[in-house]
Image (cartoon, rainbow, N blue to C red):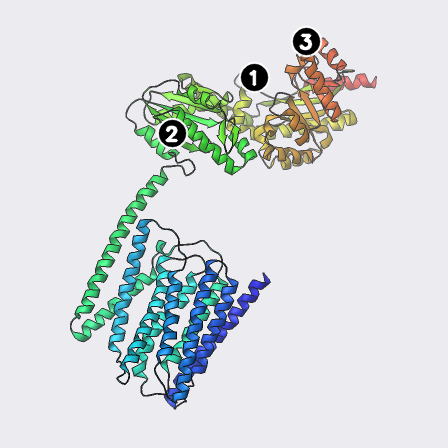
Amino acid sequence: MSDVKQTRRVAGVLACLAVGWAVLSAVLTVAGTVRPLPSWVLWPPALASIGTAVVAGLVTARFSGGPARTFWNRLTFCTVFLFLGALVHAVTTVRAGHLVLADPLTSVLYLVAAGGAIASMLRLPGRRRHWRERVRMYLDVAIIGVADAIVTARLFQVTPVPEDDRLVAAAMLGIAAIVACAGILAVIKAGVTGVGPGYGWSLWYLAPVSFLAPVSWALVPQLRQWPHISVVALVLAWVGLFFTLAARSQVRARPRPVRPAWRGISVALYASVAVTTVTLVLITLRAGYLPAGYLGGTVLLIVLVVTRQLAALIDNAHLLNRLDEQAGHDDLTGLLNRRRFSELVRQHPGPAVVLLCDLDGFHLLNNRIGDEKGDAVLRAAAERIAATVPGATVARLVGDGFGVHLPGDRTGIADDVIEAFRTPLRVEGDDLLVTVCAGVATAATGADLFRRADLALKSATFNGIDRACGYTAELEDAVRDYTEMTAALRRGLDRGEFRMYYQPIVELADGRITGMEALVRWQPADGPMVSPAVFIPVAELSGVILDLGRWILETACADAATWQHRYGANAPRVNINVSARQLLDPDLPGHLAATMARHGVDPAGITIEITETAVFDDGAAMQTVREMRELGVGVALDDFGTGQSSLTLLRTCPATTLKVDKSFIDGVTGTAEQEAIASSLSTIARTMGLRAVAEGVETREQADRLLTLGYRYAQGFYFFKPAPRPDIERLLADTASVAAA
């Protein structure tokens, strides 16, 4: 970084020097109009300015890399020839004792410098262009070239050529024209064709050179009454200044996205046409008519401008078509997007089949394999769907959702798609098994067909993974029931219709109550009690579970605080269930901490129960669990052994308790193989320092066998059924009395 700052500081110093030489040259020129000065007086600042430009070019070339270094090496080489030409010209002037035109050697050196500059800019790197872009670029270049040619020709025409040495004067005129071409080329490169990042402003600083050459030619007759003033020396000082400023601009250039000049309005294009128009008007006013040569140039310019406008109109039409195409397609897969697919379904006149499908667990897979490979999975899925339903229109609707539209009344495409995805997708050399859920609707028309397929998809997703569901009238009833229950849940929360029940957890050895699992129950004011198996899934899907979960935390913590205050060290630990949806709430740990603090609950007396599937991907949900564990509460893996990666979770999840699922407990009095699973889980928990709680114990035989297998804790109907708080209060009081006796 220090080298960059040092180089920029040097470039700034050189720019200040160049400004000083140019200003000194201008001051000496003005002084020369007041009193005679030696004919050589303007050459020292001119040589110093060009010399400064040479040093600036070397510094810039050394600082730059790649094509930029090559470009500035070439320009510096040209500047060296310009310096040599100026030096020879100055020596010739000193020897002659008066101003002289350039001799053949000087003219050759000037010519090499100007020609080399043109070649350097012609070889500036550009980008690959579509043929339409190239045509437009060439038209812009031609317009600027013709316009500037008209203006330059007029300027040279009105400037008288010295009679004493017409041959040398003609040579100088040619050199001035070539220098003007170099400057015009810089304008074209910077303002029309576009170049790589870091060149643009540098070329704009070189552009004024195109005006210096003809201006110098025009000044010669104006300054003839002061024969000691060298116009060439005056102009060379300013050429050195602009070159040095261009070099400084290159050194100070910041990396930025490449923006081709043709994308915006080309100032150079319109400026050149405007200047040409003014020039032609002045010629006509002065001469009373437009000479034939200028008339031909005008016609050519008009033809080029009209052609350019037609090309712009055609390009705009292509652009609008392309934008319309892009607006209706998905960038990742190239399929139709949701908007265009919905229009297709709505506008289709006859019967058709619409299938909507989602990739099962794609967000978990994407978190594990990364976004780039996840995108590859989506592309592979799109290809699989298109290959499975030939003749259909396939769309990517949103995320991992796809849609299929097939005219007619073909049946079985949902089963075909489900079966196709039971074969792993080949993605970047790996086989990934990604199943789908699909919903299909047939024979309806318009937007209603899309809605029906969406209902079928939601039903399939609700029932699990790798499932298909067709639309039926019963789904409408299910949706209506879902909507009504969601509203009823909201009303129930507002009206206080929810009740907290508790099921004791006991120690198998002596039956002592050591914990309570908090279980929510819903008793609507105008109906019978609703089973948790019915309303909890609806609360999860609708998001009501977030508010309901906060009520559960508040109530359970309040009860836990009462029992801790009343029974002290013998108070039961309270287990609180937290859903997968709640674990995605980043505010949950803070809310839990605030609730425990408000009620004065000892965190050691609270256990948060979660399911294995809720934290399967080790993502945001797992982070929430870790943050809650840091509060001092326990963490229990509920229904342990039925999830997707139980043993892996024992390493990644900060669990303190394993609640072994009832399906394993039912087998402890069965075959040896069934018993082995329950026994192994108890051993694993004991080895890892975890509490193992057997769930769903219903008989004495199960309780006795579990104790033999090493289990210390259990819960189930054999011991206690879930009961409301008043019943639990009496149970705890009775237990405390027995213990005291």
**Residue 397 x %, y %:** 41, 32
Residue 471 seen in the current view: yes
Calculate the distance from the C-alpha at mark 1 to the C-alpha at mark 3: 38 Å
Quarter where residue 549 is shown? top right
**Which residue is found at the position 21% from the left and 65% from the top?**
297
Q: Nearer the viewer, residue 500 or 131?
A: 131
Residue at figure coordinates x 46%, y 65% from the top left: 73
Left-right relation of 694 to 344: right
SS at circle 1: loop
The residue that label 1 is drawn on is 529
Q: Is residue 254 above or below residue 707?
A: below
| Disc number for residue 494 | none
Query: Residue farthest to the front?
Result: 105
Q: Secondary structure at mark 2?
A: strand
Q: Amino acid at mark 2?
A: Val
Q: Secondary structure at mark 3?
A: loop
Residue 394: which disc?
2
**Residue 615, horizontal then vertical, whole percent:** 61, 29
**Place of residue 735 in the rendered image (x, y in percent of width and height, measured from the top left):** 77, 17
Q: Which mark is residue 671?
A: 3
Q: Quadrant of the N terminus?
A: bottom right
| Residue 483 appears in view | no
